[in-house]
């Protein structure tokens, strides 16, 4: 059974995943309570922090399921990893189990990603070393730039089931000759850009 991790919220959240050498189960990111225009940040794989309260609900109503990690080996060179475990998806975290479409007249959440090493790897034990090797990330089929810094990868909304998710794909583009374990960290940021409650 896949283990899911949880992070809660309603307005903005930042969560990080590791790009390693072995596959991990999906994580459920539910940002914790936050006041309007007050981003909350944290690691989807370890912890989260936030402050504030919601104007109409006293508990979070939406969350985002993200990959908990991606793993490559030399055999994965140029083979794209796809599937639900690599997707990002809006989910309900309503305590009564209500669907998001039962809670909101509309909801739009912007997704951004930042690669710590510009979609390259650093060797374990050498976190300050220059990035080596490389991999690519596609969001909804579009190649994400290998720059560092937050990059918008799409908006999720409630109009259709497909619009509630961003499909992901990861490809190892270069193998390394020096044996060892290498990693990069992707940090995802989710910001609610529009919403209208139907009410309780």
Image (cartoon, helix red, strand yellow):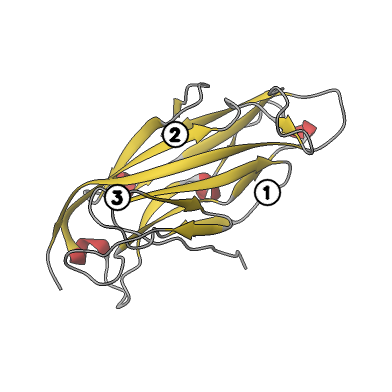
Q: Residues under labels 1 and 3: Cα distance?
A: 33 Å
Q: Residue 38 location in percent, x, y?
A: 29, 50
Residue at the image position 53 percent from the left and 36 percent from the top: 169
Q: Residues under labels 2 and 3: Cα distance?
A: 26 Å
* On screen, residue 134 above or below 81: above
| Image quadrant occupied by the N terminus | bottom right
Q: Residue 2 location in percent, x, y?
A: 60, 64
Q: Residue 53 location in percent, x, y?
A: 26, 65
Mark nearest the camera among 2 and 3 is 3
**Label 2 SS:** strand
Q: Residue 129 location in percent, x, y?
A: 73, 26
Disc 1 marks which residue? 23
Residue at the image position 49 percent from the left and 33 percent from the top: 114
- Specify which label sits upstream in the sequence, 2 or 1: 1
Q: Work out whether residue 87 or residue 198 is closer to the camera in this orientation and state it.
A: 198
Residue at the image position 21 percent from the left and 61 percent from the top: 101
Q: Work out whether residue 148 or residue 66 is closer to the camera in this orientation and state it.
A: 148
Disc 2 marks which residue? 139
Mark nearest the camera among 1 and 3 is 3
| Image quadrant occupied by the C terminus | bottom left
Disc 3 marks which residue? 38
Q: Residues within 10 Å of mark 1 (few under 14, many from 20)?
A: some
In the picture provided, is 6 more to the left or to the right than 110?
Answer: right
In the picture provided, is 126 more to the left or to the right than 144?
Answer: right
Marks 2/3 in contact by CB < 8 Å: the verdict is no
């Amino acid at each position: 059974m896949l283990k899911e991790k949880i992070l809660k919220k309603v307005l903005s959240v930042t969560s990080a995943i590791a790009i390693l050498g072995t596959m991990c189960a999906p994580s459920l990111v539910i940002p914790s309570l936050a006041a309007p225009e007050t981003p909350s940040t944290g690691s989807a794989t370890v912890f989260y922090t936030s402050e504030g309260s919601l104007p109409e609900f006293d508990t979070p109503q939406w969350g985002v399921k993200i990959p908990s990690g991606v793993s490559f080996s030399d055999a994965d060179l140029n083979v794209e990893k796809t599937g639900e475990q690599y997707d990002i998806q809006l989910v309900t975290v309503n305590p009564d189990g209500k669907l998001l479409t039962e809670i909101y007249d509309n909801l739009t959440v912007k997704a951004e990603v930042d690669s710590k090493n510009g979609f390259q790897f650093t060797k374990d034990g050498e976190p300050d070393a220059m990035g080596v090797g490389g991999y690519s990330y596609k969001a909804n089929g579009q190649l994400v730039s290998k720059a560092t810094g937050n990059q918008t990868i799409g908006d999720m909304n409630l109009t259709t089931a497909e619009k509630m998710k961003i499909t992901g794909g990861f490809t190892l583009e270069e193998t390394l000759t020096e044996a060892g374990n290498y990693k990069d960290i992707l940090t995802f940021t989710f910001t609610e850009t529009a919403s209208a409650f139907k009410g309780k």
